[in-house]
Amino acid sequence: MDPRTRSHDDYTVGWICALPVETTAAKLMLDDIHPPLPRLPKDQNTYIFGSIGQHNVVIASLPTGAYGNTSAATVGIQLLSSFHAIRFGLMVGIGGGVPSSNADIRLGDIVVSQPMGTSGGVIQLDLGKALSGGQFKRTGILNQLPTVLRVALTTLRAHHLMRGSWIVESVSDMQAKLAPHKASKFTRPTQEDYLFQAEYEHVASDTCTNCDRSKLVPRPPREDQGPEIHYGLIGSANQIVKDGRRRDQLARDLGIYCIEMEAAGLMDEFPCLVIRGICDYADSHKNKEWQGYAAAVAAAYAKELLLVVAVDQINSTTTARDTLADNADTSFGTVIHKYTIHTIGRQSV
């Protein structure tokens, strides 16, 4: 397409990030970067334009210092107001892993929201509505993924079973676009991947150097250092969970694989798939060491997913705006669970 004729209506995929490191990783995954388009009135978002394969992609970022479901919802609403041809969204970035007997989730792995039953793959953890008896209410049903994404997930999973993923190669390609000192931000850390017992609290330090190794959870070593990809439910809240006991309780009660902050705000405003690179274990031992690599592998998965989506599938998919209009009268149920969540703001992580 002649870039002189490209308009807002030529963009069919919306990619949303919350943190600068996530936005950088997303931009580096683009095959081509397009010139900016004029920002429409009342749209406060900042955009990056480009393409992956044959798909035109617009990347939107949350404002600096803005976190949580409400901020993500605002970005999604404004994006769809400006780009009427968007078919679906990708919420791509980092998250806290929730390892359990059902999922051997480790740092640098990827968790992809998996639609299950009536759930679109994301469970909203409503922290603001405490009920009697120490109970908390969470929203039970959020918008489903569009069929084009469900088909793409099935196709990509089949490819991975046959030939493995290209995630490590894609991360290497993105690093090659950067100066060495900047590329190191997205390199797999040499820091050990420690998972401590849920009740063992972090010893005050920037790292876990002083933490008691006898409190580690025994796990067999992996032969392959590349990321494992897990498909399951993602828990979304307005604040980060930073308590191993609560994390494990969420795993038992809800069966989630990952905890993050923005996705639930998007799901009712913007049909999207959530892709999270695991940078910590949602406990007191969290630090920023794995954030760059986690953002990179999540972005690499998103790129690989888009490359299995055919253009004719995109063109035959209802726009996100029309899908949401059709679902406007849907009534969402609620489910009650007994748990207390100890949290801390994302900016403090």
Image: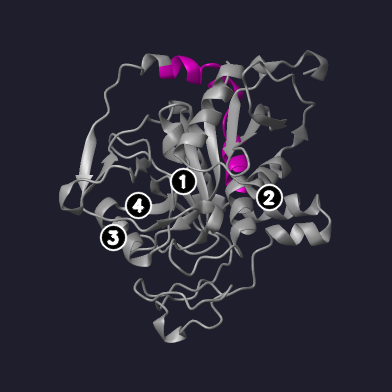
Viewer-proximal residue among 201 and 225: 201
Q: Which residue is identified by label 2?
A: 170
Dot placed on the residue nearer the N-terminal end, 1 or 3: 3
Dot placed on the residue nearer the N-terminal end, 2 or 1: 2
Farthest residue toward the left? 133
- Name the residue type under label 4: Ile
Q: Are marks 2 and 3 in contact (CB under 8 Å)?
A: no
Dot placed on the residue nearer the N-terminal end, 2 or 3: 2
Residue drawn at (58%, 42%) of the image: 302
Viewer-proximal residue among 99 and 300: 99
The crowding category of the residue bearing disc 3, from other C-alpha atoms within 10 Å (few below 14, some 14 to 19, many at least 20), is: some
Element marked by disc 2: helix
Does the magenta portion include 309? yes
Q: Which residue is identified by label 1?
A: 261
Q: Which segment is the magenta one?
A: 300-324
Q: Of the residues tagged 4 and 2, which is closer to the observer? A: 4
Give the position of the C terminus as an image quadrant.
bottom right
CA gap, disc 2 and disc 3? 35 Å
CA gap, disc 2 and disc 1? 26 Å
Element marked by disc 3: helix
Q: Position of residue 85 (x, y in %)?
A: 58, 17
Q: Are marks 4 and 1 in contact (CB under 8 Å)?
A: no
The crowding category of the residue bearing disc 4, from other C-alpha atoms within 10 Å (few below 14, some 14 to 19, many at least 20), is: many
Q: Which residue is identified by label 3?
A: 249
Q: Are marks 3 and 4 in contact (CB under 8 Å)?
A: no
Q: Position of residue 30 (x, y in %)?
A: 71, 38
Please, what is the dominant secondary structure of the magenta stretch? helix
